[in-house]
Amino acid sequence: MNIHWTQKSKLLAPIAETGHCGIFLFRMLGSIRFERGLLVSTLQQTYLIGARSLVIIMICGFFVGMVLSLQSINALQQFGASDQVSLLVGKSLFRELGPVLTALLFAGRAGTSVAAEIGLMKATSQIEAMQLMAIDPVQRIALPRFLAGLLSLPLLTAMFNAFAILGAVVFSIGVMGLDPGIFWSKLQTGIYFGKDFIGGVWKSVVFGGLVSLIAVYFGYYAKPTGEGVGTATTRTVVMSSVLVLIFDFIMTSFLI
Amino acid sequence: MKDPIIRLKNVSFKRDDKVILDDVSMDIERGSIAAIMGPSGVGKTTILRLISGQLHPSKGSIEVNGNEVSTLSHRQLYECRKDIGVLLQNGALFTDLTVFENIATPLREHTDLSEEAIRERVLAKLDSVGLLGTEELMPDSLSGGMARRVALARAVILNPKIVLFDEPMTGLDPIAMSTVRGLIRKTNDELGLTSVIVTHNVNQMKKLVDHCYILAAAKLIAEGSPQSLTRNEDPAVDQFMNGRVDGPISFRYQKATDSKTANPS
């Protein structure tokens, strides 16, 4: 089959972009200098993109816990096993829903904000001004935001899980009248620290790196126009969501 | 030319197939104020980007302060840029930092000065551009002229040898224009800088610069003092200096294939 060169370039473009993104990651990591300035700006960004995402993460976590327990009790009642609800909710939260849903919410809330901020800095020549002042914008702009994302997502996942368990408690014990002792003992004995909890932590670290890399990369290479900034934010959400789900499957197949 | 600090030798630059600059040579003398002039889109800003090493020429060489900029490594280029201040067209102030922090940024990055010494130098620069008292303001609360003056203070805070100005007077009212013009002359003479100004504002340049270069259709068509260029009889120079519609410089867009034939000389 003959493939026209434009079709070939369309096929090769995602591979080329993945390579370019990889080089950008190495450039960022290579610019790490253990100095006070990097620590301060990383903590500032952790506050801006991490702490400011807390409310949305807590609200979503709470209702995910409520709806999970509602569905679980409904299904388990048919087999007379409704006292197993905390085990089902806990397993699904720590292993899958916690890291994945937090990463998707983080991509929508913080990823877009980072991509738009860096894209706008480019459109208003602030990145260019920095280069002309002999300041590396990858080190000063991209790196602290990337590290902040890497740090924030596991912490936000922990908050998401905590509020989801709270939601499950409110619904299962408060509304459905399940015995609190059974609820907590099943959760305590059925959830394994290594397999369930640490597995979820690993996922959230990888997703944090993935979402923040995509956000800083698309922001940094956005066209310096209003349309370019818009495209960068849209691509950040779409690519982050797709890649989080793909990486989730790959990691689960190794961790299970 | 006694002591050129910037030398462009037979520089050509192409973007895709379009010729932006064709065999341009210029020597800019140390301590002078030089203007690169010409109609919009002729490649004036491209010359600034070539001098600052943001772009590399397709042919020719560019020597800045003794360094051949197109052959420098990334690290050497950043080292070379510490001697070059740049004032971009819109000022490009960092919107998340105060006026004080904007001006202090190069000092924090490239010097080991104490916080007290940084404060002293930033306030002195702010005073020299007439904006003492604005240090805690954010860039979005400044007028266009004030933002340009803050950007000038930031560009010269490291006491560079060369300052590049990209359209420093565009969009300013006549009073702000005169203020910025006076500041460029004052800063240049007091700090012993070399200033290169990209502009198409003929009247302002007549009052400010020592030497002018005029570009048209990718070529350097004339150079000299503003007074000598005013008397120049070349049709393209006369058309540009006097703002005539009719003449060899076309205002129509030149396609890539036409660029070589658009040379008026």
Image (cartoon, coloured by chain):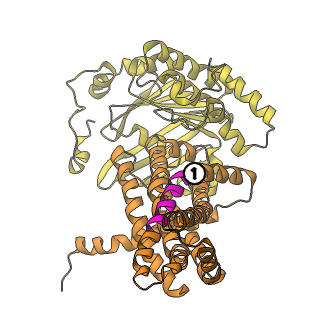
Start-end of magenta stretch: A51-67
Q: Is residue A91 magenta?
A: no
**Number of residues whose C-alpha sits closer than 10 Å to that of mark 1, classed few (under 14), some (14–19) or many (20 or more):** many
In the rendered structure, the residue with mark 1 lies on which chain? A
Q: Is residue A140 visible?
A: no
Number of marks in picture: 1
Rendered-image quadrant of the C terminus of chain B: top left
The correct choice, above or below, for A64 with respect to B144 in the image is below
| Location of residue B234 in the rendering, given as x and y in whole percent from the top left corner | 30, 26
- In the rendered view, does B72 fall on the left or right side of B122? left
Chain B painted colour: yellow
Chain A painted colour: orange
- Identify which residue, B32 or A67, lies in the foreground: A67
Q: Residue furthest top?
A: B175
The correct choice, above or below, for A17 with respect to B197 in the image is below
Q: Residue at x 32, y 49 (%)?
A: B19
Task: Name the residue beneath numbered marker 1.
Answer: A141
Q: Is residue A59 visible?
A: yes
- What amino acid is labelled 1 in the image? Ile
| Location of residue B119 in the rendering, given as x and y in whole percent from the top left corner | 75, 30
Secondary structure mostly seen in magenta is helix
- Identify which residue, B251 or B96, lies in the foreground: B96
| Location of residue A191 in the rendering, given as x and y in whole percent from the top left corner | 61, 80
Rendered-image quadrant of the N terminus of chain B: top right
